[in-house]
Image: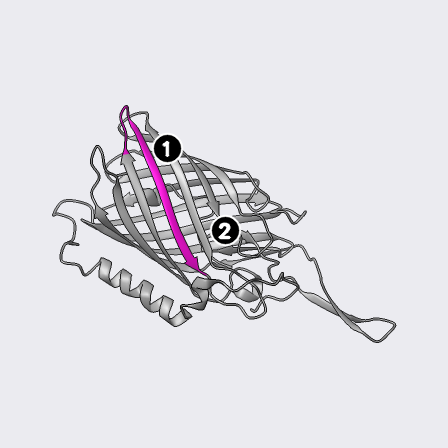
């Protein structure tokens, strides 16, 4: 199976942006949010992560095979996200992965820098138009009425992003007629400074599934889907977020894989356009231990960045 963790969405790419202030559209109640508390979601995701790596069938890789992987990448993206003002984001995650026969578990520690007017925030590694942490000013009209307005200020904020812990467990090995199926679980820890607009200051949990199917003539097909429970931020109407992507890859050689993906995820603020993009990726296995990857993201909607570029490498031992 192709290592799907290497075909990183340029801004899935890492993860992360107080209590936000400023006007936000009202949001209808989300059925999944209503029926599950934050504590319950955290327990569910952590339970799955523990289950993934305590199942008897999930043994450490055979002697002589790599048991660990470390890696890093640099992603730069830019776009106006429908706000009329450009936001540029640089994201540099460092990852440590433990490899097992039937899955893996990864810790991601990112550094990020955001330049913009505070209207875009990273959520689970993906930039979303949210209204962000824009400061406000309150004035009194001639009739004595107080009016609060958002102050659009262009700034650059940098620092530690939200740390991620994610696990993957292969429930079905692929064949010529059946796909490889993996379950995934992810916990976002709110380590990013919410006062700087680098994060929400809340935990997020994600559950999902990955499918990979080898095809004739060196082709391979991908399909991923999942659902993220967005941590509640008082005064900000953020919806839980579904996502999916569909991809097709081609092995130019045994060590060089090119692929293209269509991606869409739900806008976290009601009334905004869903982010949609095309992602072109290359993965090169230089040696058994050393791997390189690069990706180009092209936005297809106002909710997505205009473009994103990623370069990365990882080492297995």
Circle number at residue 80: none
Q: Which residue is mark 2?
A: 266
Count residues near mark 1 (Cα–Cα under 10 Å), then give few for <14, some for 14-19, many for 20+: some
Q: Which residue is mark 1?
A: 248
Residue 47 lies, with reference to residue 12, above or below; the image says below
- Residue 226 highlighted magenta (yes or no): yes
Where is residue 46 drawn, in percent x and y?
A: 31, 65
Quarter of the picture holding the N terminus: top left
Q: Which residues are magenta?
A: 214-229
Residue 289 lies, with reference to residue 227, above or below; the image says above
Where is residue 72 drawn, in percent x and y?
A: 38, 47
Where is residue 143 drawn, in percent x and y?
A: 86, 74
Residue 203 lies, with reference to residue 59, above or below; the image says below
Kindly state the secondary structure of the residue where label 2 is placed.
Answer: loop
Residue 178 can be seen, yes or no: yes
Kindly state the secondary structure of the residue where label 1 is placed.
Answer: strand
Left or right placement of residue 188 versus residue 196 in this view: left
Instruction: In this rendered view, identify the residue nearer to me: 18 or 143.
Output: 143
Residue 191 can be seen, yes or no: no
Going by the picture, which residue comes out furthest to the bottom? 144
């Amino acid at each position: 199976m192709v290592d799907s963790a290497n075909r990183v969405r340029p801004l899935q790419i890492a993860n992360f942006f107080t209590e936000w202030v400023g006007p936000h559209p009202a949001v209808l109640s989300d059925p999944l949010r209503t029926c599950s508390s934050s504590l319950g979601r955290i327990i569910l995701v952590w339970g799955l992560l523990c289950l993934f790596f305590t199942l008897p069938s999930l043994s450490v890789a055979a002697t002589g095979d790599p048991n660990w992987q470390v890696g890093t990448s640099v992603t730069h993206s830019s776009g106006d996200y429908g706000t009329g003002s450009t936001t540029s984001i640089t994201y540099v995650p460092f990852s440590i992965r433990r490899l097992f026969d039937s899955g893996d578990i990864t810790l991601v520690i990112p550094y990020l820098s955001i330049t913009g007017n505070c209207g875009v925030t990273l959520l689970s590694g993906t930039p979303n138009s949210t209204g962000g942490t824009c400061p406000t000013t309150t004035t009194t009209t001639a009739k004595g009425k107080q009016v609060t307005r958002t102050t659009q200020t262009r700034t650059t904020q940098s620092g530690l992003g939200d740390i991620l812990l994610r696990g993957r467990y292969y429930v079905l090995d692929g064949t010529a007629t059946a796909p490889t199926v993996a379950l995934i679980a992810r916990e976002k820890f709110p380590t990013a400074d919410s006062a700087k607009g680098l994060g929400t200051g809340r935990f997020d949990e994600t559950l999902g599934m990955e499918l990979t199917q080898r095809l004739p003539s060196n082709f391979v097909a991908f399909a991923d889907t999942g659902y993220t429970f967005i941590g509640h931020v008082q005064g900000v109407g953020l919806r839980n977020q579904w996502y999916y992507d569909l991809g097709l890859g081609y092995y130019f050689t045994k060590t060089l894989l090119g692929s293209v993906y269509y991606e869409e995820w739900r806008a976290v603020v009601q009334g905004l356009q869903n982010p949609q993009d095309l992602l072109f990726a290359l993965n090169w296995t230089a040696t058994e231990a050393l791997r390189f990857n690069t990706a180009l993201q092209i936005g297809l909607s106002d909710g997505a960045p205009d473009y994103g570029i990623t370069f990365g490498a990882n080492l297995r031992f």
